Image (cartoon, rainbow, N blue to C red):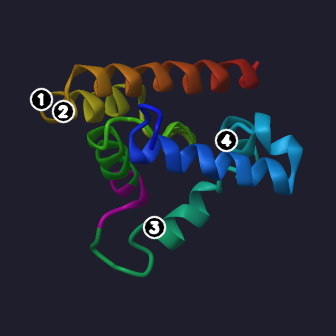
Amino acid sequence: MSDNKNPYQAMFAQYQEMAKSFNPALESFTPKGFETLWPTMPKDVMEMFFGNSMNKGGLDAKTRLLLTLGALTMLGAQADAQIRLTLRHLVEVGATKQEIVETIGQMSMFAGIPATTRAMELVQEVLADKEGSDT
């Protein structure tokens, strides 16, 4: 390669060019708008699929979602859409702000300050959106 791009940057640039050739509108695609297509499941549905309805005595949906949030934080809090969706589902199953913040805080010693800070920013964003939609 004649330029100073690393192989991943070059591969990403190739994928962008390919996507633009298929559909020029993909040049400005952002996953943030895409995430609004995924609705928040009702609490009963989440409990049935992700909770202990089929696994009596197992983890409930809230606990599983808190674990998911912890894992997403550990991965560097880079998956904004997945974190937002998990946060919306946590609110739906009755998780408190304190439980959500403690879950992220627990990951801080392992995930680091940048990941924890990003996850907390997403919490503020989602909870502010939720409060705005309730009024």
Q: Residues within 10 Å of mark 3 (few under 14, many from 20)?
A: many
Q: Which type of secondary structure does the marked residue at label 4 adopt?
A: helix
Give the foreground label among 3 and 4.
4
Q: Is residue 67 left or right of residue 16?
A: left
Q: Which type of secondary structure does the marked residue at label 2 adopt?
A: helix
The residue at the point 19 percent across, 26 percent down is: 112
Using the numbered discs, state the Cα–Cα distance from disc 4 to disc 1 in whole angstroms: 29 Å
Residue 60: in magenta span: yes
Tell me which numbered mark, 1 or 3, is placed earlier along the sequence.
3
Tell me which numbered mark, 4 or 1, is placed earlier along the sequence.
4
In the rendered image, the vertical position of residue 111 relative to residue 20, given as above or below: above
Q: Nearer the viewer, residue 41 or 77?
A: 77
Residue 94 at least partly seen: no
Image quarter in which the N terminus is found: top left
The disc labelled 4 sits on which kind of residue? Answer: Pro
The span picked out in magenta is: 59-64
Q: CB of mark 2 within 8 Å of CB of mark 1?
A: yes
Where does residue 114 sit, x and y in percent of width and height? 29, 21
Residue that sits furthest to the front in the current view: 2
Q: Which type of secondary structure does the marked residue at label 1 adopt?
A: helix
Using the numbered discs, state the Cα–Cα distance from disc 4 to disc 2 in whole angstroms: 28 Å
Using the numbered discs, state the Cα–Cα distance from disc 3 to disc 4 in whole angstroms: 25 Å
Q: Is residue 50 left or right of residue 133?
A: left
The tag on residue 31 is 4
Where does residue 25 sit, x and y in percent of width and height? 87, 42
Residue that sits furthest to the left in the current view: 109
The tag on residue 106 is 2
The disc labelled 2 sits on which kind of residue? Answer: Gln
The disc labelled 1 sits on which kind of residue? Answer: Met
Q: Which type of secondary structure does the marked residue at label 3 adopt?
A: helix
Tell me which numbered mark, 3 or 2, is placed earlier along the sequence.
3
